[in-house]
Image (cartoon, grey):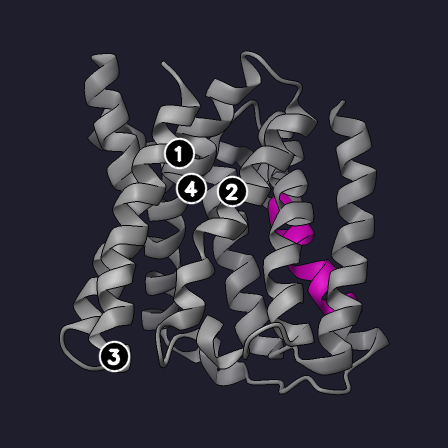
Amino acid sequence: MTPWRYFLIVFGYSWIIWSLAIFSGTPVDDFPTGILYILGGLGPTVGWIISNILDGEKETSETILKAVKFYSLGFNGLAVTACLAILPMFLSWCVVSEGSTLDLTVVSSIVPIVMLTVVSVIEETGWRGYAYPQLNQTHSPIISSLIIGILWSLWHLPLAMIRGTYQHGLGYWTPEFLLFFFLMVPNSLIYGWLLKYTNQNVASSVLYHTLVNLTGEVFGFTGKSDIARTVVITILAIILGIKTV
């Protein structure tokens, strides 16, 4: 059982498919780019399933079900996860709202919530459900979180070259681009602390991921508000990272 084999599978699978999307030259909402975009995004789950098969494990469906059993976190787990996901965003918006575009319509429909949850399950069952525990066998939780955060960030890079994606819309090497890719690293420390707090319950990672993305859609951070968000989350990550040691 090795996380590095998992990382090779994830990057190889996703980057090859996303490269085809890039070379197709069409926007993400056109064929075949849209299909390739979705297929490439399945990388963390595909890597996890293949790794499980190679490891002789057969708990795929059971693990996915556990990932969405948010009630298993208990009241404290739910409350802490929700607070860590929402309050830093709200605080950032209160401190610097300039550049933010408040949009409450995002939470007025169940569709975006379900879609964001599905994306979170696809990513977290692999990154935090499989790779993180494997890394923890030979590294400290904080080092494991940093490794996951860096690789998780790098995994998204090809999306910046696919027209019509969120990452492509950030522009190349703009402050928004750099903040997006940097923020995944401190965020990964928060994921690590949550896993420790919830006794390695990956449902906390799925819920946190979903709420962070959903809250980000609501506040629409850009410019100075995006910088404020990054500063607040980084400070929180450092505090929780120290507590994780």
Measured Cα–Cα span from mark 2 to mark 3: 26 Å
Q: Position of residue 20 (x, y in %)?
A: 22, 63
Question: Which residue is under mark 1?
Answer: 7
Measured Cα–Cα span from mark 1 to mark 2: 8 Å
Which mark lies nearer to you, 2 or 4? 2
State if disc 4 and disc 3 touch (CB < 8 Å).
no
Look at the image and give the residue range highlighted in magenta. Answer: 81-91
The label shown at residue 151 is 2
Disc 4 crowd rating (10 Å Cα; few below 14, some 14-19, many 20+) is many
Q: Is residue 64 visible?
A: no
Q: Is residue 87 visible?
A: yes
Question: Which residue is under mark 3?
Answer: 25
Please state which of residues 119 and 173 is positioned toward the viewer in this rendering: 173
Q: Residue at x 28, y 82 (%)?
A: 27
Question: Which residue is under mark 4?
Answer: 124
Which mark lies nearer to you, 1 or 4? 1
Residue at the far left: name it.
Answer: 31
Which one is earlier in the sequence, the residue at label 2 or at label 3? 3
Measured Cα–Cα span from mark 3 to mark 4: 30 Å
**Amino acid type, mark 1:** Phe
Disc 2 crowd rating (10 Å Cα; few below 14, some 14-19, many 20+) is some
**Amino acid type, mark 4:** Glu
